[in-house]
Image: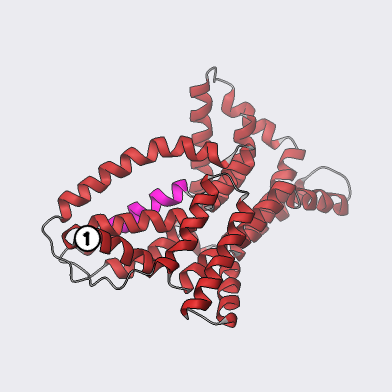
Amino acid sequence: DFYKMPITVAFVISSVVAIAISKGGKLSNRIEQFCRGAANSNIMLMVLIFILAGAFAQTAKAMGAVDATVNLAMSILPGNLLAAGIFLAACFISISVGTSVGTIVALAPVAVGIADMPDALMLGVVVSGAMFGDNLSFISDTTIVATRTQGCNMNDKFKVNIRIALPIAIITGIIYVLVGSGIDSNYTAGAIEWTKVVPYLVVLVAAICGVNVMLVLFIGILLSGIVGLLTGGFDIWGWTASMGLGITNMGELIIVTLLAGGMLEMIRYNGGIDWIILKLTSRIHSSKGAEMSIAALVSFANLCTANNTIALIMAGPIAKDI
């Protein structure tokens, strides 16, 4: 059970060890070196984006955007295409809010038990749609970390990813149409509340158009709050509470990001990153080999931490150098 050891505690221990064994003179100097790594501009920008992303996702959920999206998908598609409708809703929600786990938590209770289909199949539908959207979302924590550590444009990353993900999603959707055809749903779609879907659409379109991600998220929070107030989803204090909860939910990731930034700076300062790159690439003479070494590095980091975002934070700077 990976999560018996809290990831924050694991990184605190790692950071203490990094400072303790580092060269660099007095303890105060080594601590200062660690703090410079934690306060790196890329790290701090990621933290700010995590804060805004958490606030937006929770605010949109609190004002009813998830239920509105499910109603929209189920109203557009015939009742006997339930699996395809849930898949479509999961894709759209996760690409809009940037979290596969958040999408699964929000959508799984709705999906299970609304048709004469096995629970395992319906959960598979939700998970596959959630993974598709998280893979492409502009405000996903994995996308933020990957693009910031590599210094590339989010639009370029999106264009590369969609060529891989979209054909597979279309094939998956067709399979769900075939599997779910002829099975009646006991789900009664409510009235379509277009206004509650608007924040998702605006965030998605603005991000694709290349608007600064922090501005996109701020607009999303503002729109979600206004829609929630106008539709009675929450009052002003409900809105602030939603933002607060969303930010708090990002707390662990923010703490680990700061600790990882400091720890990686200590590793870099002591020559550890150069050593890792040398060991990984000593027998590599092609770009394909370099890609395989990066894949192995990220996979190993993910196995150690059980968290893709943290694995990317650790492996990203090394991958860029490779």
Q: Name the residue under label 1.
A: 82
Secondary structure category for the residue under label 1: helix
- Front residue (pair 84, 32): 84
At horizontal 18% and vertical 63% (from top left) the residue drawn is: 79
Question: How many numbered marks have been drawn onto this rendered protein structure?
Answer: 1
Residue 314 location, x and y as percent? 61, 45
Q: Where is residue 204 in the image (x, y as percent from the top left)?
A: 49, 52
Q: Can residue 90 be seen in this view?
A: yes
Compared with 203, 233 (above or below) is below
Taking the image as drawn, is residue 8 in sight? no
Which residue in the rendered view is the most extreme toward the left? 182
**What residue appears at the point 62 percent right and 33 percent down from the top-left corner?**
320
Residue 245 found in image quarter: bottom right
Q: Is 283 on the left-hand or right-hand side of 40?
A: left
Q: In this view, does 102 lie to the left or right of 42?
A: left
Residue type at mark 1?
Leu
Please provide the residue range marked out in magenta: 125-136
Instruction: Say whether residue 134 is magenta.
Output: yes
On the rendered structure, is 215 left or right of 139? right
Task: Identify the residue shown where x is 69% and y is 55%.
Answer: 258
> Which SS does the magenta portion mostly show?
helix
Residue at the spot x=55%, y=53% of the render? 141
Residue placed most toward the observer, 178 or 301: 178
